[in-house]
Image (cartoon, helix red, strand yellow):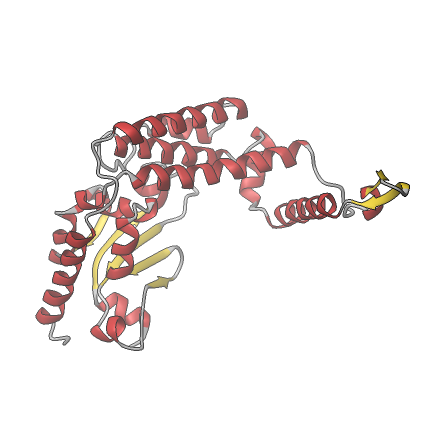
Amino acid sequence: MDTQQLAEQNRIFYTRAGSRAYGLATATSDEDFRGVFIGLPANLIGLYPVEHCELSGDNMLFELRKFISLAKDCNPNIIELLFMDESDILLQTEWWQRIKAQRELFLTRKAKFTFSGYAMAQLKKIRGHNRWLHDPQPVEPPEPAKYLKVKPIEGLGHREVFDQTAYEMALKGWRQYWEWKNNRNEKRAVLEAEHGFDTKHAMHLIRLLRMGVEIMRGEGVQVKRQDRNELLAIRNGVMTYEELVALAEEYERQLENLYETSDLPHGSDVDKINRLMVDIYHDYWDAHGLW
């Protein structure tokens, strides 16, 4: 049995995902789908491990153990699958319902690090691209001769010394700029040219930070966004670059404070999660005669 057949025949959950699940889709938004399937015993204890299956388009199915492993660490793209709006769920079996009934097991203070980590990675890109937009690199790579400096050397007077570190940093920055410039998404390039930063990245940056704050407050994972109008306004360029950075930094401070005061546990009850997973494997294989 190939991986796609395995995943589709043993799928226990399937949902719309991405912008459509957040309520942030536009007329040009792609359709994303995510799901979970249960592998065979040979996939877990044999020589044929399977962690996921990527179908056509942005359509990803995760094997149960891989899903559980990512969910217990509060991976933002995974933990949200346990909190999808019912209107977006296309398939949920009794096996999924058993996991969903205990979804609070997966909510911990790790959310501070994972949601903030994903968000600040977005902010780093926005900052870097904004710098490149205002200070583009030249067509030609940096000249080594520019990194020759005259320095006093004891007993030898003044000598030219090549600053290898500075040159390598400059060369790395030049390469990164032209890799970005030559391979950037055309739609994103238009947004950056118009607003000085990628406003779609900005929208998801703020969404991630807000979701992290909500989790840390004990409000669960709010996938379908009630603040959709405000988030779409960010996507449409309502904020300046400076306002966006200030807002992101404010949410980051909130997350730092909430980490100290949240009622959530610091980490997952791994034993409970493991028992849940093992029981589902056992019962699913037994019910389908897969032993």
In terms of depth relative to the viewer, which is nearer, 61 or 269?
A: 269
The residue positioned 25% from the left and 70% from the top of the image is 44
In terms of depth relative to the viewer, which is nearer, 12 or 71?
A: 71
Q: Position of residue 196 (x, y in %)?
A: 58, 30
The residue positioned 40% from the left and 29% from the top of the image is 252
Q: In the displayed structure, would residue 229 be above or below residue 18?
A: above
Q: Quadrant of the N terminus?
A: bottom left
Q: Position of residue 43 (x, y in %)?
A: 27, 72
Q: In this orientation, does residue 65 appear?
A: yes
Horizontal arrangement in the rendering, residue 203 relative to residue 16 (left or right):
right
Q: Residue furthest front?
A: 155
Q: Quadrant of the C terminus?
A: bottom left
The residue positioned 85% from the left and 40% from the top of the image is 154
Q: Residue furthest right?
A: 157
Horizontal arrangement in the rendering, residue 270 relative to residue 243 (left or right):
left
Horizontal arrangement in the rendering, residue 175 relative to residue 64 (left or right):
right
Q: Quadrant of residue 231?
A: top left
Q: Position of residue 140 (x, y in %)?
A: 78, 47
Q: Position of residue 268 (x, y in %)?
A: 22, 46
Horizontal arrangement in the rendering, residue 71 relative to residue 103 (left or right):
right
Q: In the displayed structure, would residue 186 be above or below residue 203?
A: below
Q: Quadrant of residue 10?
A: bottom left
Q: In this orientation, does residue 26 appear?
A: no
The residue positioned 39% from the left and 27% from the top of the image is 251
Q: Exactly how many numbered labels are in the figure? A: 0
In terms of depth relative to the viewer, which is nearer, 62 or 254?
A: 254
